[in-house]
Image: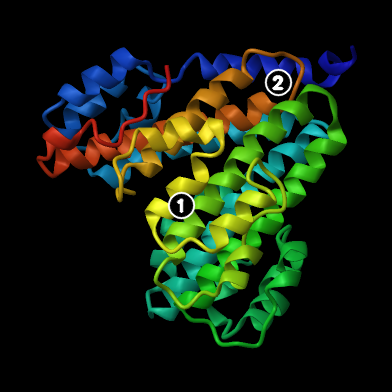
């Protein structure tokens, strides 16, 4: 009853933003474009117009993605400024995933002796925090936590990955997945505490995210030295696959065994039925398509915070679509343009 006192205005705003998402007709026109300037011209008639209008030719894919991301950031900041508790905390939770990706990007880049300034430019603007540039000085997890992350919202998630081992590619990937696991579980608990339609809708969306990560961790760790127990520790403690699906995924040795496990769960059976045996390249797209369906359904109910999460995710998917189309056009690979585009409407 009292939702609209604090959340009504912002829910109206986010539903208005959602109306500005690109439609199937927009994507069909974008897929016909011959050059990046054609893409810019088409986008000038959409909500991205003001962000791209002053960009000189020749355009680069990175510029298009950067400007489209800037629009998302501006919208997010506007919503965050207007939000009161507990919505403001909910909105902050949405950015923690980007923070984790940024931390991993900087640490991996430093390990490979890349320039810190160049790495900072590649970071997602929603996941920036004050001391991010100093990440480059850390030699192991303990230092990373003590020098930098202790003052960020990610601090509580680090308790499970503080070791004195030096950072290498394998450790960093384990760190990313351990952080993500702790983050998703924390976000899930927060949504449960909010109760009502928010808990119901967000439980479904976060459970899907946790299950997708479990499948990706399994597939990516096949053939590496990661033990079964270590693999199981990286799975989130909730979701449709928890706990029995996790037990089975932990012992999978190839993609077809993963498929066998997933086909026991009806919501995921339809995803794997789209793939031929032994094929995992199209799995990401199949998962994205399923996620987009679920995110669109979040808008069917009112008076809940799931619409904010859904909108941010749909906009990020749209930016991924634009990046793929732009890359295909720039590299003259127009025959592949439909391979990775996920239609939202």
Q: Nearer the viewer, residue 221 or 9?
A: 221
Q: Is residue 44 above or below residue 283?
A: above
Q: Which mark is residue 288?
A: none
Q: Is residue 65 above or below residue 270?
A: below
- Residue 61 makes an appearance in the image: yes
For the C terminus, the image quarter is top left
Q: Quadrant of residue 46?
A: top left
Which of marks 2 and 1 precedes in the sequence? 2
Q: Check the image and name the residue furthest to the right.
A: 2
User: Badge 2 local density, few (<14 within 10 Å), some, or many (20+)?
Assistant: some
> What SS does tag 2 mark?
helix
The residue beneath circle 1 is 258
Q: Nearer the viewer, residue 179 or 73?
A: 179
User: Percent x, y for residue 190?
Assistant: 81, 42
The residue beneath circle 2 is 10
User: Percent x, y for residue 335?
Assistant: 12, 34
Judged left or right of residue 251, residue 259 is: left
User: Percent x, y for residue 15?
Assistant: 60, 15
Q: How is the image coloured?
A: rainbow
User: Badge 1 local density, few (<14 within 10 Å), some, or many (20+)?
Assistant: many
Task: Write the residue at 24% across / 18% down.
Answer: 28
> What SS does tag 1 mark?
helix
Q: Can you tell which of label 1 and label 2 is closer to the viewer?
A: 1
- Marks 1 and 2, how far apart at CA: 41 Å
Q: Is residue 247 above or below residue 322?
A: below
Task: Write the residue at 73% across / 63% down.
Answer: 157
Task: Write the residue at 76% across / 71% down.
Answer: 159
User: Percent x, y for residue 136?
Assistant: 53, 77
């Amino acid at each position: 009853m009292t939702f609209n006192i604090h959340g009504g205005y912002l829910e109206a705003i986010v539903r208005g933003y959602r109306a500005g998402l690109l439609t199937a007709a927009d994507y069909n026109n974008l897929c016909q474009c011959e050059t990046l300037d054609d893409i810019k011209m088409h986008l000038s008639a959409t909500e991205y117009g003001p962000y791209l209008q002053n960009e000189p030719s020749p355009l680069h894919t990175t510029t298009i993605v950067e400007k489209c991301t800037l629009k998302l950031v501006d919208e997010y900041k506007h919503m965050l400024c207007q939000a009161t508790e507990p919505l403001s905390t909910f909105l902050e939770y949405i950015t923690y995933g980007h923070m984790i990706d940024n931390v991993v990007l900087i640490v991996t880049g430093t390990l490979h002796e890349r320039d810190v300034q160049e790495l900072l430019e590649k970071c997602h603007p929603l996941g920036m925090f004050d001391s991010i540039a100093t990440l480059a000085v850390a030699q192991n997890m303990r230092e990373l936590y003590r020098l930098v992350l202790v003052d960020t919202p990610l601090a509580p998630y680090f308790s499970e990955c503080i070791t004195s081992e030096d950072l290498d590619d394998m450790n960093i990937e384990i760190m990313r997945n351990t952080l993500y696991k702790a983050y998703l579980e924390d976000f899930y608990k927060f949504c449960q505490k909010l109760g009502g339609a928010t808990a119901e809708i967000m439980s479904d969306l976060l459970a899907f995210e946790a299950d997708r990560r479990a499948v990706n961790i399994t597939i990516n760790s096949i053939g590496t030295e990661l033990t079964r127990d270590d693999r199981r520790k990286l799975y989130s403690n909730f979701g449709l696959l928890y706990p029995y699906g996790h037990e089975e995924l932990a012992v999978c040795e190839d993609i077809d065994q993963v498929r066998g496990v997933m086909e026991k769960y009806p919501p995921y059976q339809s995803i794997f039925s789209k793939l031929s045996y032994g094929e995992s390249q199209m799995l990401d797209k199949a998962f994205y398509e399923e996620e987009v369906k679920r995110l669109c359904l979040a808008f069917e109910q009112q008076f809940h915070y799931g619409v904010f999460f859904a909108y941010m995710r749909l906009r990020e998917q749209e930016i991924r679509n634009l990046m793929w189309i732009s890359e295909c056009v720039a590299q003259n690979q127009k025959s592949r343009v439909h391979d990775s585009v996920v239609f939202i409407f």
